Image: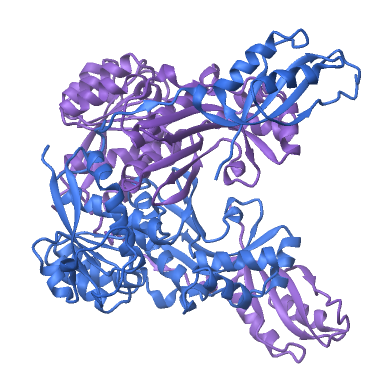
Chain colours: A purple, B blue
Amino acid sequence: MNTCSPIGIGLAGFGTVGSGVWNTLLRNGELITGRTGGQIALQIAKILVRDPAKVRATTSEVPPAMFTTDWRSLVADPAVNIVVELIGGTSDAFDIVAAALRAKKPVVTGNKALLAQRGVELFAISKEFQTPIHFEAAVAGGIPIIRSVQDSFVGNRILSFSGIINGTSNFILGRMSEAGLTFEAALAEAQAKGYAEADPTLDVNGWDAAHKAILLATLAYGFPIDVAAVHVSGIEQVRPADIAFANSLGYVIKLLAVIREHPDRAVEIRIQPSFIAKSNILASVHGVFNAVAVHGDAVGESLFYGRGAGQDPTASSVVADLVEAARSLASLGCHRGFLPYCSAGRLVPVGDTSTAYYVRFDVTDRPGVIAEIARVLADHRIGISGTHSPVNPANPDAEFVDMIFLLHTCPFGKLQQALTHIETLDCVNSTPVVFRIEALT
Amino acid sequence: MNTCSPIGIGLAGFGTVGSGVWNTLLRNGELITGRTGGQIALQIAKILVRDPAKVRATTSEVPPAMFTTDWRSLVADPAVNIVVELIGGTSDAFDIVAAALRAKKPVVTGNKALLAQRGVELFAISKEFQTPIHFEAAVAGGIPIIRSVQDSFVGNRILSFSGIINGTSNFILGRMSEAGLTFEAALAEAQAKGYAEADPTLDVNGWDAAHKAILLATLAYGFPIDVAAVHVSGIEQVRPADIAFANSLGYVIKLLAVIREHPDRAVEIRIQPSFIAKSNILASVHGVFNAVAVHGDAVGESLFYGRGAGQDPTASSVVADLVEAARSLASLGCHRGFLPYCSAGRLVPVGDTSTAYYVRFDVTDRPGVIAEIARVLADHRIGISGTHSPVNPANPDAEFVDMIFLLHTCPFGKLQQALTHIETLDCVNSTPVVFRIEALT
């Protein structure tokens, strides 16, 4: 169990996500091996491309011998243990995935259209050849919603999903809302920023979200879903006036995918622009972010939020699936319960951690108090961004009052030194209370 | 591969969470077996209790022969394949977990104090006996944060966590904020509602959150963390005036667990009341809910949100770990890539799905328009909650205007019939635009 198994990867497709997988394995390959107890090393063995001469935006050079333009040779290559399908579409991609499964090589794919439209065929081949298809990257980019539904919520009857699962639409609706842009102007902006493709049809007409919703529903309810029977409408008809009116009523408009269990094994699936209350956490999902709210009968309400697309987030999901496929190939089972203490590390002393601060002093109110405290802070070179003393209307001339200081970012140890000094001042009556002011991203 | 393996479970502890596991397996056992391709049936075989005569709040009666008061007989019972430790504390619980691992029986536990304080010893035993400890239930109840960090983000260097991981504190701070209650009054309310224990010390002093943060940091950074060196402060010193002042500056106060990677393999861990901007999604985490924001170098910002405690959410995580442990025991590997089409099911026709609606009509503005449309809606027995026509200030007497109707909940098919009729009216110039108004929980 302690020898490392190098696992060869065949990448079919080397665009944005494929390059992201290359970069991620280059950057974090050793970390991944450490986390698997030194037992797995993922190595890209072969890459299918249309044009081997094309310049690639990877962080290291790809050896030209790695490229092939023939998918059959990639799948058949004995150095390829797992096939990653990233070429998109439902035709060649289908052939590659089917051939890999038949060769008993596990498949990792992010191709939601392929699985939504031809999943029934592919999952039958997967079962026949006892070889898995992993597809975390197919739904909501870096958000681990597939694994959470399959594994973490395996004990739950899933009552519903409500998802914002198309970042392009969400960005467009957001810009229409913030800046009063028309749909057309917001779409143009999304294209300029690279958030919408040259042909944005599937993003704005709801079908990209529909493919993802179909996969989620298939996982949760375990029956094949007829794509043509799903009700889908897109955001093309949303106008700034609709958004403004929704806003006046306490709503935002989001492209929402709704999946809901009905009695007698029936399931509702629909994708359309929807009014949702501003107080709902989904209303706080801005820009190109995605979120999926899941309601399980045991877990209750839960929500997964993150980047639903993009090179690195999608690569994150592909790599997670690669590790899972590799664990199976290396017969490691699911024993992630061993905590691999894989590295030396140390705790940062709290004195060396920095934030801004809110400090409340209990002081005797007399002229000079602020000056005295400020003097000590200045001596310790700690900047003040504001001071405030709440006045008690019932007793505006109280002798003992709270004096609040807002302080610039500094190491906590430096603050502690200053406070130790300040505590010795006559005007300060007890140990100051400190709360952190966090600069969260 | 197609025979079902009954897996026997020994439950050590039968309080809130233990009863939840019983109920969940009773309710969803068949579903779970179906989802594992008919290959796993989880069966509770033995239950460790202090008092077998005590009345239990389970949804079915527990056969008295299942109870034992001797943990050694539970661990040794040949019918027990997996041991679930739910008794709490760090003494007997340690002995039970260690004995189970030595007997090569996988352990599932939700005991964060045990793992934070004595994890180094237990994980060494786990490794020695090649038997896993699963502990999803130890951090944030039903939220699958452990599995997401271990598996889904395995390809990521974790840059930081920011978590609201103590629901009791979050409830108390929320009530202080909403209702201006003192800490003491809000704590009493939490106790009355069952959100705080009779001895709430570990919840309000930050140590419950600290234990969880220590587990998260251990997973992400792979080295044992000295519990005594972690900086922890609780919410006891927060006053309504602090919250009001924070609010005036655009902040909320939350008990925040922060874990952050520094250079040279150093890690910052601290738990304290913190100001966070109202615009941050963590500020929207209310009541007893938990949330963990994770920043990975590939996945970017992501967030997991849900119920961080309680009978059923915690049981959801225990059951997920049981299935994972059972898959390993049954040598099923991690082949969750086969989609088990385990059930018959059908799609609900969209005409049978119901919400409220926003409908925008393009009408010729003349007296009687609202009456005509309202008449048709009434004929179809669809209720109107409001109508509105946005006036264009530049052209208040425009001939063609938008007329918006807000409609009560009805089946979409009924609305479609009414709209088909309305489209034939002279005053209506094009196909009406319909958006849903969702009643999300």
Q: Is residue A129 above or below residue B20?
A: above
Give residue A135's position: percent from left, percent from top. 34, 33
Q: Quadrant of the C terminus of chain B?
A: top right
Residue located 24% across and 59% down the image: A338
Pick the front one: A199 or A78: A199
Q: Is residue A72 above or below residue B287?
A: above
Give residue B164's position: percent from left, percent from top. 52, 61
Give residue B183's position: percent from left, percent from top. 62, 75
Q: Can the viewer see residue B241 in this picture?
A: yes
Number of numbered discs? 0
Q: Is residue B398 above or below residue A29?
A: above
Would residue B250 be found to the left or right of residue A16 on screen? Answer: right
Residue located 42% across and 34% down the image: A262
Pick the front one: A304 or A324: A304
Q: Quadrant of the N terminus of chain B?
A: top left
Would residue A359 be found to the left or right of residue B352 on screen? Answer: right
Would residue A119 be found to the left or right of residue B383 on screen? Answer: left
Instruction: Examine the image and state in which quarter residue B438 appears.
Output: top right
Instruction: Examine the image and state in which quarter residue A108 appears.
Output: top left
Residue located 77% across and 16% down the image: B372
Pick the front one: B304 or B352: B352
Give residue A366's position: percent from left, percent from top. 86, 86
Q: Can the viewer see residue B222 in this picture?
A: no
